[in-house]
Image: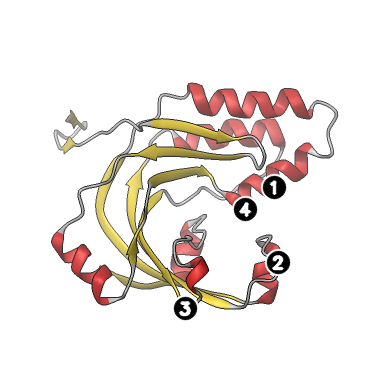
Amino acid sequence: MERTENGKERNILIPEKANFLEENCNALLAISRPEIPERILQEASTRGLQEKPEFHISVIASRNGRAIADFLSHVEEAKRIKEQIRDDFIQTQWKYELLDAYYFLEKFYNAEELKKSGYIDIPEHTRYTLIQEVRLDELGGYYERLARLTGISFEKPFSHTTLFSGSDYEPMATRGIGVYSQKDLDTYLKAKI
């Protein structure tokens, strides 16, 4: 437990591992399974959602990873810049706090969205997720450094971990929906639980 300036206790946790995926510039913090309250387990069951097989916090998720990869494909110093991005991510002393804030989200993937996400020969479908908000204090500073390195103006990600997922297209039932910002949360939010 850590105390804030006003004396409130915070349950600060350390990720199990920082994973940087070289092929797509994604950066994930592997975390242990959160303690999930009974009301959230019941909500997920009622909605027919499956518990995720692993838990992580996306620091650089697919949309931002694609933007970085696209940038790197046009610069001479791509290898050095990518190494800086990776090393900064790995060396950051990440800590997180699971907040008592849960959200049920729904996103329809039409043909355009599927193409933009890199899916070929996948039918249009809807995905559902139940996420838990996370406080990740180091995220703002990391994105400031990332913006200086790449010149890309990223929206600050909405920090969360996906607890449960589902889809009306079974092969995508365990996939998330890509909540990259507060704007995305507002767009796909169906219920705060």
Residue indicated by mark 4: 63
Q: Percent position (x, y) of residue 119?
A: 67, 64
Which residue is the site of mark 1? 67
Circle 2 residues within 10 Å: few <14, some 14–19, many ≥20: few
Residue type highlighted by circle 4 = Arg
Task: Give the vertical position of 5 relative to 115 (above or below).
Answer: above
What amino acid does circle 2 point to?
Ile
Contact (Cβ within 8 Å) of mark 1 with mark 4 = yes
The location of residue 86, given as percent across then percent down, is 60, 28
Q: Marks 1 and 3: which is nearer the front?
A: 3
**Left or right relative to 157: residue 44:** left
Q: CA distance from mark 1 to mark 2?
A: 19 Å
- Give the mark nearest the N terminus, 4 or 3: 4
For the N terminus, which image quadrant?
Answer: top left
Q: Residue at x 27, y 57 (%)?
A: 101
Looking at the image, which residue sits at the far front?
A: 171
Task: Identify residue for label 3.
Answer: 168
Question: Which residue sits at x=14%, y=33%?
Answer: 7
Q: Which residue is mark 2?
A: 120
Q: Residue at x 16, y 57 (%)?
A: 37
Where is the C terminus found, in terms of image quarters? bottom left
* Distance in Å between CA atoms under marks 4 and 2: 17 Å
Query: Cα distance, mark 1 to mark 3?
Result: 29 Å
Label 4, label 3: how far apart the Cα atoms are: 23 Å
Q: Secondary structure at mark 2?
A: loop
On screen, residue 103 versus residue 181, left or right, reads: left
Mark 3 is on which residue type?
Asp
Is residue 164 shown above or below 79?
Answer: below
- Circle 1/circle 3 CB separation < 8 Å: no
